[in-house]
Image: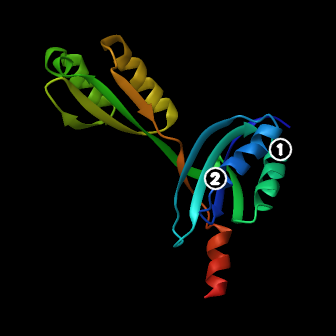
Amino acid sequence: MEDKTFTISVYSENNVGLLNRISGIFLKRHINILSLNVSESEIENVSRFIIVVNTTEKWVQNIVGQIEKQIEVIKAFYHTDEETIYLENALFKIASGLLFDEKQIQNIIKESQSTIVTVSRDFFVISKSGRRSEIEELYAKFKPYGIMQFVRSGRISVSKEKMEISTMLEALK
């Protein structure tokens, strides 16, 4: 089996220590977490972890099984990139003078479909949502001009198919 990128979705109660136990599952198997995002889910009082890993399907199946053994976990799923709609967000902080002095900066912003979030005397901030490759490309274009600060979120995603958890919850109504 070859390594592929998988997105693991974990629906859980929001309890202290769960993130540590979940990360321990990956640590024991020497699998690097490429991206991690935790937020509220579409279900009231339920959190959703989005974990991105590069491994084999056999390993991801084992990991999901181990995650589901955690008491607070309601359900865990895994999907390939083809089965999800996903993106990341990034913020770039750049010196304000460049916005006015370097016409190419304005072209880069427009061509990349980025948004100027704020402009101050000393800096401006650009926001970009998209695939990791789009954000990396924008980073490469801004780098020669000097990036004061850069931050990128973890992946956020939704599955293309209806999640089994939605069916489970409808049955409980």
Residue at position x 59%, y 63% in the image? 14
Residue 102: where, in percent of width, then height? Answer: 19, 15
Please, is residue 96 above or below residue 39 in the view? above
Residues marked 2 and 1 touching at CB (< 8 Å): no
Tell me the residue that label 1 is attached to: 59
Camera-side residue: 46 or 62? Answer: 46
Query: Residue 33 vs residue 92: left or right?
Result: right
Alpha carbons under labels 2 and 1: distance apart: 18 Å
Tell me the residue that label 2 is attached to: 83
Residue at position x 29%, y 33% in the image? 126
Residue 162: where, in percent of width, then height? Answer: 61, 67
Residue at position x 75%, y 44% in the image? 24
* Residue count near mark 1 (Cα–Cα under 10 Å), binned few <14, some 14–19, many ≥20: some
The furthest residue to the top:
144
Query: Residue 121 vs residue 159: left or right?
Result: left
* Residue count near mark 2 (Cα–Cα under 10 Å), binned few <14, some 14–19, many ≥20: some
Secondary structure of the residue carrying tag 1 is: helix
Please, is residue 79 above or below residue 173 in the view? above
Q: Which of marks 2 and 1 is in front?
A: 1
The furthest residue to the bottom:
173
Camera-side residue: 41 or 45? Answer: 45
Residue 136: where, in percent of width, then height? Answer: 47, 26
Query: Residue 101 vs residue 70: left or right?
Result: left
- The kind of residue on which mark 1 rests is Trp
Mark number displayed over residue 172: none
Query: Residue 12 vs residue 85: left or right?
Result: right
